[in-house]
């Protein structure tokens, strides 16, 4: 996988150096992200419709799980 960088240090997948340690991530439009369940993530990527975005401000990472959360596996993504 390509290097994915993220500065959200309270994410379960965040590693030192602002590296995302998830083995896969799902980025979608805010419109889809707002309407999809929190557990709807990268393993469901084929179910997401292709959506346009006008700028980076219109996108969101569905893979975020708060560090220390007891539900970190609910997204179906594993930490590397």
Image (spheres, rainbow, N blue to C red):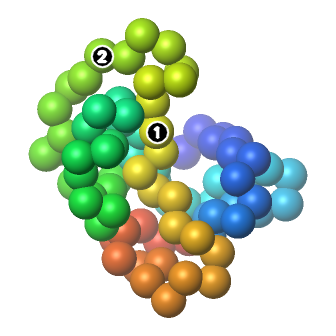
- Residue at horizontal 50%, vertical 89%? 70
Residue 60, disc: 1
Q: Position of residue 22 (x, y in %)?
A: 55, 60
Inspect this view and state whether residue 43 appears. no
SS assignment at label 2: loop
Is residue 51 toward the left or the right of residue 65 in the image?
left
Q: Position of residue 74 (x, y in %)?
A: 35, 76
Which residue in the protein does label 2 denote? 52
- Residue at horizontal 21%, vertical 25%? 50
- Residue at horizontal 33%, vertical 43%? 33
Number of numbered discs: 2
SS assignment at label 1: strand
Q: Residues within 10 Å of mark 1 (few under 14, many from 20)?
A: some
Is residue 75 toward the left or the right of residue 48 in the image?
right
Going by the picture, which residue comes out furthest to the top? Answer: 54
Relative to 58, residue 61 above or below: below
Q: CA distance from mark 1 to mark 2?
A: 12 Å
Quarter of the image for residue 77 reads bottom left
């Amino acid at each position: 996988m390509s290097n994915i960088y993220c500065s959200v240090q309270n994410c379960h997948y965040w590693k030192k150096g602002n590296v995302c340690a998830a083995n896969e991530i799902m980025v979608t439009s805010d419109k889809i992200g707002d309407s999809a369940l929190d557990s709807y993530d990268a393993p469901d990527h084929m179910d997401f419709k292709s959506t346009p975005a006008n700028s980076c401000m219109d996108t969101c990472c569905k893979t975020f799980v708060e560090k220390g959360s007891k539900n970190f596996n609910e997204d179906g993504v594993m930490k590397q």
